């Protein structure tokens, strides 16, 4: 699906004492980079805010004057896009995921009821958080009606500065996409930031969050069978020696990369390399156990 992305990253962050919110980190990665990870396949990505280092290339712009509010910022970003569908995101969503983005992008053309055709006049889709609140800065809009409504607002008010987003979205026909528990979580306060940092380290999710962060940091997009790799590390540690665990998983990754370079499917290459190394670790352990039993018997 072809779309452009606009990320609004120029707010004043008053509830954070004017801190540079997009640069604040959760799980060792800047909030802005975490949001950019959720839309890696955008044809063009425009960030409305001050220039800064980002994990992937983006286009930069600012509303005029700076600090003009979300509608003015959205207009500035929209002027740099050409796709018929535009994803609009705020830069403070640490848990936004690609599945949520995909749901937003597909919702405007989804059938309105079972067995019925898509509604051609639908203007976009907006995320609705678990508490039932609409999130206009986690949304996908069709560019033409969005430009039309922005132009009408500018004509009516003489300026876009200071206008609330509801003045824009109230006139659009938007589908609602129900948010996953954390997809709409934003960091408006220091307490929010602390909560996000605590959530990312919770026992049930820390490995998934860590693997996702490492893949983003290394610039790879690969399905990781965490259980298989952990089982391999356990077998290598117990059957050979503790230092064998990280070294073995490293070698599995190297072998998989080599296989992928020759045309093999990366995920299958990891699975095959893991299987071979795990079998070797088990044979190694069985041999050591047999030798130990023999020595004890002879003694």
Image (cartoon, grey):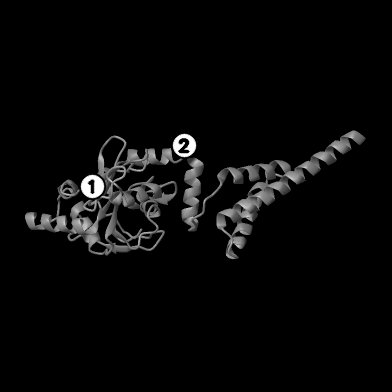
Q: Report how far apart the C-alphas of labels 2 and 1 lie in the structure.
A: 35 Å
Identified at 19% across, 53% down, the residue is 71
Quarter in which the N terminus is drawn: bottom left
Mark drawn on residue 49: none
- Residue 279 lies, in percent from the top left, at 71, 47
Q: On the image, which quarter does residue 231 sit in?
A: top right
User: Alpha-carbon neighbours of circle 2 within 10 Å: few (<14), some, or many (≥20)?
Assistant: few
Q: Is residue 237 visible?
A: yes
The residue that appears at 28% across and 49% down in the rendered structure is 117
Determine which residue is flagged by label 1.
174
Q: Earlier in the sequence, mark 2 or mark 1?
A: 1
Q: Identify the secondary structure beneath mark 2.
A: loop
User: What residue is shown with label 2?
Assistant: 202
Q: In this orientation, which residue lies closer to the viewer: 208 or 16?
A: 208
Q: Residue at x 65, y 55 (%)?
A: 251
Q: Of residues 137 and 83, which is closer to you in this image? A: 83
Pointer 1 local density, CA inside 10 Å: few below 14, some 14–19, many at least 20: many
Q: Is residue 139 visible?
A: no
Give left or right: position of 131 versus 217. left
Q: Position of residue 52 (x, y in %)?
A: 34, 60
* Quadrant including the C terminus: top right
> Where's residue 60, x and y in %?
29, 63
């Amino acid at each position: 699906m072809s779309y452009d992305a606009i990320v609004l990253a120029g707010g004043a962050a008053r509830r954070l004492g004017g801190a540079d919110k997009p640069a604040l980190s959760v799980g060792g990665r800047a909030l802005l980079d975490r949001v950019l990870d959720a839309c890696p396949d955008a044809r063009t990505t425009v960030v409305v805010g001050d220039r800064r280092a980002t994990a992937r290339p983006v286009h930069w712009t600012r509303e005029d004057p700076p600090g003009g509010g979300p509608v003015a910022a959205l207009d500035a970003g929209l002027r740099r896009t050409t796709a018929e569908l535009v994803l609009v995101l705020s830069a403070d969503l640490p848990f936004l995921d690609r599945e949520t983005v995909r749901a937003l992008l597909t919702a405007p053309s989804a059938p309105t009821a079972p067995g019925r055709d898509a509604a051609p006049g639908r203007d976009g889709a907006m995320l609705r958080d678990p508490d039932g609140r609409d999130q206009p800065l986690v949304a996908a809009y069709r560019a033409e009606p969005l430009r039309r409504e922005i132009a009408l607002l500018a004509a009516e008010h003489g300026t876009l500065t200071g206008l609330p987003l509801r003045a824009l979205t109230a006139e659009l026909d938007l589908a609602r996409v129900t948010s996953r528990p954390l997809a709409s979580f934003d960091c408006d306060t220091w307490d929010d930031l602390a909560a996000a940092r605590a959530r990312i380290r919770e026992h049930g999710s820390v490995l998934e969050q860590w693997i996702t962060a490492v893949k983003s940091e290394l610039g790879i997009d690969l399905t990781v069978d965490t259980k298989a790799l952990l089982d391999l590390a356990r077998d290598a540690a117990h059957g050979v020696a503790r230092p064998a665990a990280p070294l073995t998983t490293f070698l599995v990754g190297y072998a998989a990369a080599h296989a992928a370079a020759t045309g093999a499917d990366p995920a299958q290459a990891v699975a095959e390399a893991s299987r071979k190394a795990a079998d070797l670790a088990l044979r190694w352990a069985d041999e050591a156990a047999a030798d130990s039993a023999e020595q004890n018997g002879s003694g």
